[in-house]
Image (cartoon, rainbow, N blue to C red):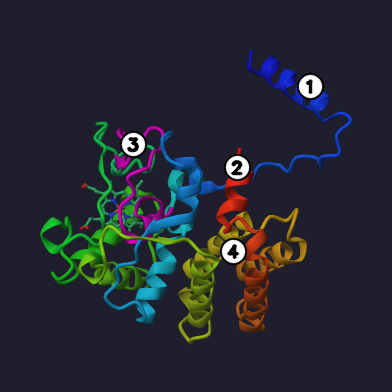
């Protein structure tokens, strides 16, 4: 039935185009982040705005590295990683996500059952009990996990990655950086209901933070950071499609490949400088441009 309809629709489109000079339609872009939104959510809004950044120490390198890791699907294991979910998919910019819907995991929009067997067999409790995704910047009294008790947050994060999401045991630095980021989240530092734009600069900053880390002596446990950087490149690739940004998108792929192979990366800073110029220059034609995005979504 569906197939018949599709063929009929395609045929009608061909007929409609005959004699006209309109160019062939571009394939509609595909954005991972739209895989887990409710039907009521405006996809354009979901891709262009996010809750405000509420950080006590936004310039602290550990906080910045934690933020980078927070956006990496590959920190989580199992089905979550396969689906492309990161911490930030549920906690947008470290906050909540009222639009989150993931089949088998969510009840009402904005909820998730993180003890579901879909994510990990270890924590599976056989009960479907989705709860609201909390804003990690919420005031002290509303927090589930203490930010001040010695090691409590670190223990929670390790258990969460390995038990809830079936991820590999993370390096110590990964837990420390994630904890630094989460400790720095505090709604008292911002207008808690404010929103801000999603920009290519967000991803560029993550890449710079990762590059600075790879430049230090502590590179032996850097694989989580490299993977997080690759995820950032992947998100840029979605916004600067190869059909329009041939050279730029090739460079995104090429840097990603270098991150997956070399021990030390040659000229990474220089490559990021060039990339940054390309991203800035191409922005009006990219899917960071709201009007362009709205026109292109099906
Ligand atoms: C599928 C959605 C989802 C993903 C992915 C996710 N979380 Fe959560 N998170 C939740 C939900 C739902 C709760 C509330 C659990 C509860 O109330 O029992 C929660 C609770 C928390 C809490 C405790 C709340 C507080 O403020 O004390 C922290 C900290 C946290 N998550 C951090 C993370 C980190 C770090 C990651 C990535 C490693 C992550 N989350 C990934 C949905 C998610």
Q: Do the residues labelled 4 and 3 touch (CB within 8 Å)?
A: no
Write the residue at 85% across / 34% down: 20
Question: Residue 185 magenta-drawn?
Answer: no
Counting residues from the start of the chain, the first of labels 4 and 1 encountered is 1
* Label 4 – label 3 distance at C-alpha: 28 Å
| Closer mark to the observer between disc 1 and disc 3 | 1
Q: Residue 233 carries which label?
A: 4
Q: Name the residue under label 3.
A: 106
Picture coordinates of residue 252 (x, y %)? 66, 65
Write the residue at 26% across / 68% down: 190
Circle 1 packing at 10 Å, graded few (<14), some (14-19), many (20+), is: few
Q: Are marks 2 and 4 in contact (CB under 8 Å)?
A: no
Circle 3 packing at 10 Å, graded few (<14), some (14-19), many (20+), is: many
- Magenta residues, as a range? 86-113
* Label 1 – label 3 distance at C-alpha: 38 Å
Q: Name the residue under label 1.
A: 11
Circle 2 packing at 10 Å, graded few (<14), some (14-19), many (20+), is: some
Q: Do the residues labelled 3 and 2 touch (CB within 8 Å)?
A: no
Q: Residue 297 carries which label?
A: 2
Instruction: Tell how many labels.
Output: 4
| Closer mark to the observer between disc 2 and disc 4 | 2
- When the figure is inspected, residue 95 is found, relative to residue 203, above or below; the finding is above
Q: Quadrant of the C terminus?
A: top right
Counting residues from the start of the chain, the first of labels 2 and 4 encountered is 4
| Closer mark to the observer between disc 3 and disc 2 | 2
In this picture, residue 114 sits left or right of residue 255:
left
Q: Are marks 4 and 1 in contact (CB under 8 Å)?
A: no
Picture coordinates of residue 195 (x, y %)? 36, 59
Q: Is mark 1 on a helix, strand or loop?
A: helix
Q: Is mark 2 on a helix, strand or loop?
A: loop
Q: Do the residues labelled 2 and 1 touch (CB within 8 Å)?
A: no
Counting residues from the start of the chain, the first of labels 1 and 3 encountered is 1
């Amino acid at each position: 039935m569906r197939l018949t309809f599709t063929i009929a629709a395609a045929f009608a489109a061909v007929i409609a185009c005959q004699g006209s000079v309109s160019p062939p339609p571009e394939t509609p872009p595909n954005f991972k982040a739209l895989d887990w939104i409710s039907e009521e959510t405006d996809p354009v809004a979901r891709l262009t705005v996010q809750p405000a950044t509420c950080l006590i120490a936004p310039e602290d390198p550990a906080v910045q590295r934690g933020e980078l890791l927070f956006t990496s699907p590959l920190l989580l294991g199992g089905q979550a990683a396969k689906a492309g979910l990161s911490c930030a998919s549920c906690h947008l910019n470290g906050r909540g996500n009222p639009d989150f819907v993931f089949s088998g995991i969510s009840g009402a929009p904005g909820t998730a059952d993180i003890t579901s067997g879909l994510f990990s067999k270890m924590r599976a409790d056989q009960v479907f009990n989705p709860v609201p995704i909390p804003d990690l910047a919420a005031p002290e009294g509303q927090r589930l996990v203490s930010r001040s008790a010695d090691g409590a947050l670190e223990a929670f994060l390790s258990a969460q990655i390995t038990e809830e999401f079936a991820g590999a045991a993370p390096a110590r630095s990964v837990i420390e950086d994630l904890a630094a980021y989460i400790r720095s989240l505090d709604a008292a530092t911002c207008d808690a209901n404010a929103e801000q734009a999603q920009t290519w600069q967000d991803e560029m900053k993550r890449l710079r933070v990762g590059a600075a880390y790879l430049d230090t002596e502590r590179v032996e446990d850097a694989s989580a950071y490299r993977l997080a950087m690759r995820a950032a490149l992947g998100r840029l690739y979605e916004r600067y499609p190869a059909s329009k940004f041939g050279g730029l998108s090739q460079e995104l792929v090429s840097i990603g490949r270098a991150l997956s192979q070399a021990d030390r990366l040659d000229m990474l800073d220089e490559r990021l400088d060039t990339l940054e110029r390309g991203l800035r220059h191409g922005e009006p034609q990219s899917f960071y441009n709201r009007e362009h995005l709205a026109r292109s979504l099906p």
